[in-house]
């Protein structure tokens, strides 16, 4: 399978998004998602894609595209899992802070 430049970019951006999520750098993800979406739209509306899925492109090209899409979907799942874990950790921290604030308020009222 010979991957097009756009298809390789699509996968690379997805992998960089996962790396950022693993590092806790959530702020850059929306920008990278916009970039990834542009690349994806470019590729899937391109002649390269049309040839790959036509009879000329053959099954091997279509399988290659399918593999990349499956890899990106797996990466997305991993990012979602990390986001859920981060959300849970933040909620626990918030609960702890609220509890400390309540204890502090009660202490100040009893003085």
Image: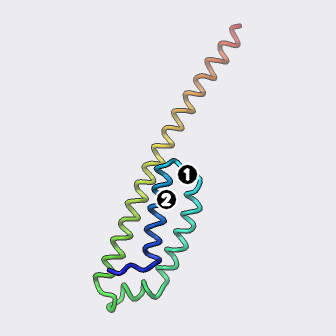
The part of the image, by quadrant, that contains residue 61 is bottom left
Q: Position of residue 92 (x, y in %)?
A: 51, 33
- Residue projecting furthest to the bottom: 56
Percent x, y for residue 71?
37, 65
Looking at the rendered image, the quarter that the C terminus falls into is: top right
Marks 1 and 2 sit apart, C-alpha to C-alpha, by: 9 Å
Label 2 crowd bin: few (<14), some (14–19), many (20+), radius 10 Å: many
* Helix, strand or loop status at disc 2: helix
Dot 1 lies on which element? helix
Which residue: 36% across, 76% down? 65
Q: Nearer the viewer, residue 105 or 75?
A: 75
Report the disc number at residue 17. 2
Q: Name the residue under label 1.
A: 26
User: Looking at the figure, which quarter contains the N terminus?
Assistant: bottom left
The residue positioned 55% from the left and 57% from the top of the image is: 29
Residue 105: x and y, percent? Answer: 67, 18
105 with respect to 24 (left or right): right
Residue found at x 47% / y 72%? 9
Report the colour scheme.
rainbow
């Amino acid at each position: 399978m010979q991957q097009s430049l756009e298809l390789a970019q699509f996968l690379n951006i997805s992998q960089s998004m996962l790396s950022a999520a693993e590092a806790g750098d959530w702020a850059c993800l929306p920008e990278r998602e916009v970039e990834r979406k542009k690349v994806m739209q470019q590729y899937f509306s391109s002649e390269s894609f049309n040839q790959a899925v036509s009879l000329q492109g053959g099954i091997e090209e279509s399988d290659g595209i399918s593999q990349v899409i499956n890899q990106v979907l797996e990466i997305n799942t991993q990012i979602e899992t990390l986001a859920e874990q981060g959300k849970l950790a933040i909620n626990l921290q918030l609960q702890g802070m609220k509890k400390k604030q309540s204890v502090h308020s009660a202490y100040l009222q009893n003085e």
